[in-house]
Image (tube, rainbow, N blue to C red):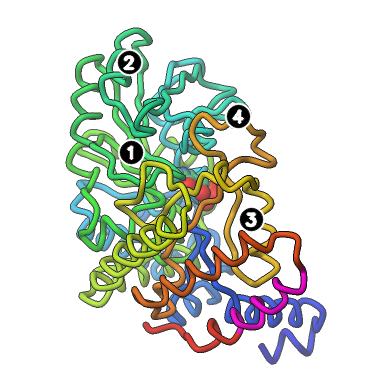
Amino acid sequence: MEHLFNQDSEIAQLIQQEEERQHSTIRLIPSENYVSKAVMEATGSVLTNKYSEGYSKKRYYEGQENIDAIEDIAIERAKSLFGSYGANVQPLSGAPANLGVLLGLLQPGDKIMGMALPHGGHLTHGWKVSATGIYYNAVQYELNPETKRLDYDMIRDMAKKEMPKLIIAGASAYPRFIDFEAFRSIADEVGAYFMTDMAHIAGLVAGGVHPSPVPYSDVVTTTTHKTLRGPRGGLILMAKGFVTKVNKGVFPGLQGGPHNHTTAAIAVALKEASSDSFKEYAKQVVSNAKVLADSLIEYGFDLVTGGTDNHLMLIDLTNKGITGKDLSSALNKVNIETNANTVPFDKRSPMDPSGVRLGTPAITSKGMKESEMKTIASFINRVSQSINDDEKLNKISEEVKEFSSKYDLVF
Ligand SMILES: Cc1ncc(COP(=O)(O)O)c(C=O)c1O
């Protein structure tokens, strides 16, 4: 960062500090990851200098020969990796991807049905404070109170009663496989469009360790920066008959010029995600999550649904007599990053909920395997017993730093 240090050392130093922080912490936030140097180079390229409103061969600005080629490659790679009919690589991130689809397929005020935020859904699945809940008539399904899992009979009953125009599957904090085929049949029964938001699990789907929503969904949206390990961005996969409408929803419906540097980095990430080593990575993410979950259970932690099928887990801390914020801030003090999270049917407020959400995508990118998961579980257990004991937390912090700095990116 030679030029940056010369021109703006204040920002350069903060970036450098963040780099060091990311190196020395155990990053367990399940929506975060580390990208490759190749992805980073594409993101930091001259493509940021170019405006390209429109789509390939139909742009509103001249000088698009390289941009069109890059966007065409990204689209082809997305279609081939996920087996979809069409792809749009322009959404600026996951939230714009979701809103772009709604704009393309629906009229304001139409009814949509998504998973409630406190049960693990995302804001943009119709939660009342999001544009998707303000401009659409959103109803929200919840988890089964006994199993804390999706209950397809409950979802079907609700869909039949509410008759939504579009049903959304997908979540930000759900540790189990989702039955996309069941959602498809519910959508067909009520004549609704079926959209899946696979932001969290896209890398697992690409790596073949999570069932794919693509064969069952009219539209699949995703972020590109979580398990997929690309730049911050969004991607929409579309079945036949949906491309024109959804593309119009994204541009001109929602956005202006695409971020071409991000498009190029998405293309690079999709190439990486098609490799055998990425398949190994995805497998390891899931295997690590299972071992971390089992080890936490051995320490007496109560995991929502008793474990995980994917990359994340939710600890309900009620039995430990501490809150999610208590544990996530104590973990932060020892350089273990997590986030406090509501658990299904939480009686506490979202600002200080009962749970903590953990995941393995970033630590797996750093080369950690099953044995490291056991060490991390023991750190978490010790921290949970030392919430207000700064002396003990300082000692654990030193151990975490030493442990974490031994690992570097392995791709
Ligand atoms: C399921 C899901 N969809 C959409 C998003 C939104 O992505 P972004 O924050 O990049 O807009 C997220 C982000 O966490 C998510 O978990």
Whichever of labels 1 and 4 marks the residue nearer the N terminus, that label is: 1
Q: In the figure, is residue 409 to the left or right of 213?
A: right
Foreground: disc 4 or disc 2: 4
Element type where label 3 sits in the image = helix
Determine the CA span between mark 2 and mark 1.
16 Å
Q: Residue at x 35, y 23 (%)?
A: 166
Element type where label 4 sits in the image = loop
What is the magenta segment's predominant secondary structure?
helix
Q: Is the N terminus in the top left, top right, bottom left or bottom right quadrant?
A: bottom right
Q: Residue at x 23, y 74 (%)?
A: 275
Pointer 4: what residue? 347
Whichever of labels 3 and 2 marks the residue nearer the N terminus, that label is: 2
Determine the CA span between mark 1 and mark 3.
32 Å
Element type where label 1 sits in the image = strand
Pointer 1: what residue? 196
Element type where label 2 sits in the image = helix
Q: Residue at x 44, y 83 (%)?
A: 409
Q: Is mark 2 within 8 Å of ligand 1?
A: no
Whichever of labels 1 and 3 marks the residue nearer the N terminus, that label is: 1
Magenta stretch bounds: 390-401
Residue 304 numbered tag: none
Whichever of labels 4 and 2 marks the residue nearer the N terminus, that label is: 2
For residue 245, say whether it is visible. no
Q: Amino acid at mark 4?
A: Lys
Pointer 2: what residue? 159
Which residue is at the front of the view, 387 or 193? 387
* Label 3 packing within 10 angstroms: few (<14), some (14-19), many (20+): many
Q: In the figure, is residue 25 to the left or right of 62?
A: right
Q: Is residue 149 magenta?
A: no
Q: Is mark 1 within 8 Å of ligand 1?
A: no
